[in-house]
Amino acid sequence: MSAALALLIRDVKLAWREGGAIGVALGFYLVVVVITPFGLGPDLNLLARVAPGMLWVALLLATLLSADRIFHNDYEDGTLDVLATGPLPLPLVAAIKSLAHWLTTGVPLALLAPVLGLLLNLPLDAMPLLVLAMLAGTPAVSFIAAIGASLSLGVRRSGLLLGLLVLPLYVPVLIFGVSTVSAAIVGPGSPWPPFLMLTALSLASIVLAPLAAAAALRTALR
């Protein structure tokens, strides 16, 4: 446990110390949401209806900008080879790195969402559920991104390949995330069934994604 915690703290510190990937993700998220009202016009009711979808789509795309860094830097400097032969199982290493990505990218984006929701006329009473849904859904986003990052490791122009691999897998997260917030705004129905499905997707990703990522890492390290 001490080795796992040390690896998690190391990855979180490195992510915040570098800052570039996090800053780009937050900046992209902000820019996409800010320019949306200019494209849709001044209809406040329309903005409120599309706000959940826009916030979730922008979050998924912003997360992709930093996804290739989950393993890339450690692969380039040889740290990943050391971790693969260390005391921690490779699936656990992949899980810890995915968790660090969620803590440094998914959580800040989720906490920023209510502020950007004001720009899209999102009702104030829907803000808590928006943050809750994003905190529940973004673990799936980071852990699925780890699969794409491991499959594209060492490939030239890996960012484009990563997007092609990961975006189709994000569709269920997008559907249930938007459904959760939309049900709270316009109804009909309860937001909790899609929220529970979103939580289930994250739990399944936490269990299964590290196994798939570790298999891809073993192939890349051969």
Image: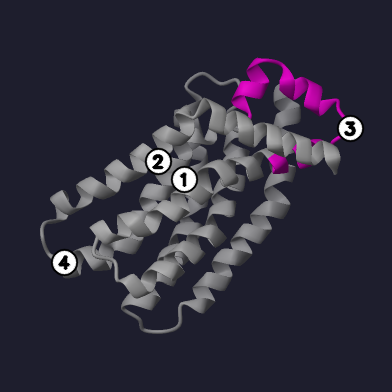
Please state the horizontal and vertical placement of residue 182, each as a whole percent of the image: 36, 71
Residue occupying image coordinates x 73% and y 21%: 79
Q: Residues within 10 Å of mark 2 (few under 14, many from 20)?
A: many
Please state the horizontal and vertical placement of residue 131, each as a whole percent of the image: 46, 62
Q: Which quarter shows the N terminus?
A: top right
Earlier residue among tags 3 and 4: 4
Query: Mark 2 is on which residue type?
Result: Leu
Please state the horizontal and vertical placement of residue 194, each as a whole percent of the image: 50, 72
Q: Which residues are magenta?
A: 71-96
Q: List the residue tagged with mark 1.
A: 167
Earlier residue among tags 4 and 2: 2
Q: Are marks 3 and 4 in contact (CB under 8 Å)?
A: no
Earlier residue among tags 1 and 4: 4
- Secondary structure of the residue carrying numbered label 4: helix
Q: CA distance from mark 3 to mark 4?
A: 56 Å
- Secondary structure of the residue carrying numbered label 3: loop
Q: List the residue tagged with mark 3.
A: 87
Q: Residues within 10 Å of mark 1 (few under 14, many from 20)?
A: some
Q: Which quarter shows the C terminus?
A: top right
- Secondary structure of the residue carrying numbered label 1: helix
Residue occupying image coordinates x 44% and y 30%: 160
Residue ranking furthest to the top: 77
- Secondary structure of the residue carrying numbered label 2: helix
Q: Residues within 10 Å of mark 3 (few under 14, many from 20)?
A: few
**Mark identifier at residue 44:** 4
Q: List the residue tagged with mark 2.
A: 26
Q: CA distance from mark 4 to mark 2?
A: 24 Å
Q: Nearer the viewer, residue 220 or 202?
A: 202
